[in-house]
Amino acid sequence: MKKAIKIIFAIAIFVSMLNVSYAVRPTYKLTAQNFNLRAPNELVFDIYLLHTNSVDTVFQFALGQYYFNFDTLFCAGGTISYDFAPGNVGDSSDFPFAARPRNPTRNGSSLRVNSNTVLGIGNGPIVRTVAPGSKVIRMRLRTTAAAFSSNNLVDLRLQWRNANAGNPFVKIFGYIGGLNTEMTDSTGHIIDIITGTGNPGNVTSIIPKEFSLSQNYPNPFNPSTKIEFAIPVNGNVSLRIYDITGREIKNLVNEFRAAGYYSVQFNASDFASGMYFYRMTVQGEKAFDVTRKMILIK
């Protein structure tokens, strides 16, 4: 009986702490990043949302709308289109379908994608706290011209369309104290443009302060999952998958990487259900070695 009382007391404390964490206003960083020229007239980039005060609160996402201003001259006189970037299944967003934005359009010099439907308390995804955060969506800008006017993506002059630009503008909502609450803060809206044509979804221009290997997401998974890692210095990176016996079954990364944030997809469609391990090692100016486990359920 005493043991049962202790368990009930512990649960009550946990629930109380959870309610407090949901009552504190989350802070965030909203970043457009991973800009990549897939073709001379096709540009893709990702929108990420990062929870930045995770010690104090839980950030349960409610809805968001994402608007930009840009220089139409970048599209070299062609007809401009703006839509969701096609890609591998599960690669375009970390959010469930209902939490993703809708109806991308181009209106003059603004790029618009409207908010998702209101999810309801308890149904919104929890925004990630490990940089670069949760990928909201991958977007694509195209022109019917043979090529954009410049290979320097800074010439796109992309800017978040915030409240000072008038309606419509960027808005972010989360659940605070159980209520769907607007928490928009334009000071956390960032454009991180990389000049060049690097791989989409790979490195950004922000240099991390320390090594990290995130827990794969989703976990458990079937059959595909994402692994994100960060390296603060250049080095030779190895990321390998092992089964429960310690046998290596997949080599995901085995090459020199520049300092930055990275994302790798692991498809386990050829493997049986069970527990697996992934190990990352870095050799360079600084060394790093860590192993985490993941669960495949089919």
Image: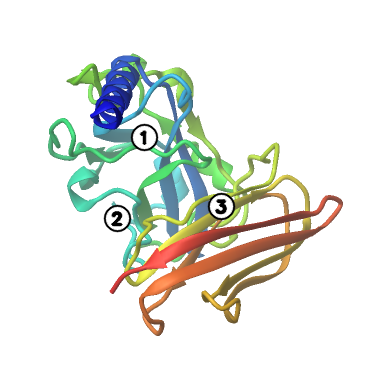
Could you give the CA–CA distance between mark 1 and mark 2, rounded to whole angstroms? 15 Å
Q: Residue at x 23, y 21 (%)?
A: 167
Could you give the CA–CA distance between mark 3 and mark 2, rounded to whole angstroms? 22 Å
Question: Can residue 261 be seen in this snapshot?
Answer: no
| Secondary structure type for disc 3 | loop
Q: Residue at x 35, y 57 (%)?
A: 92
| Secondary structure type for disc 1 | strand
Compare residues 252 and 57 and report the one nearer the observer: 57
- Indicate which disc, 3 or 2, sits on the residue closer to the N terminus: 2
- Indicate which disc, 3 or 1, sits on the residue closer to the N terminus: 1
Residue 41 in percent (x, y) is at 44, 62
Q: Residue at x 71, y 61 (%)?
A: 281
Q: Which mark is residue 150?
A: 3
The answer to whether 236 appears left or right of 169 in the picture is right
Residue sticking out furthest to the bottom = 270
Residue 283 in percent (x, y) is at 81, 60
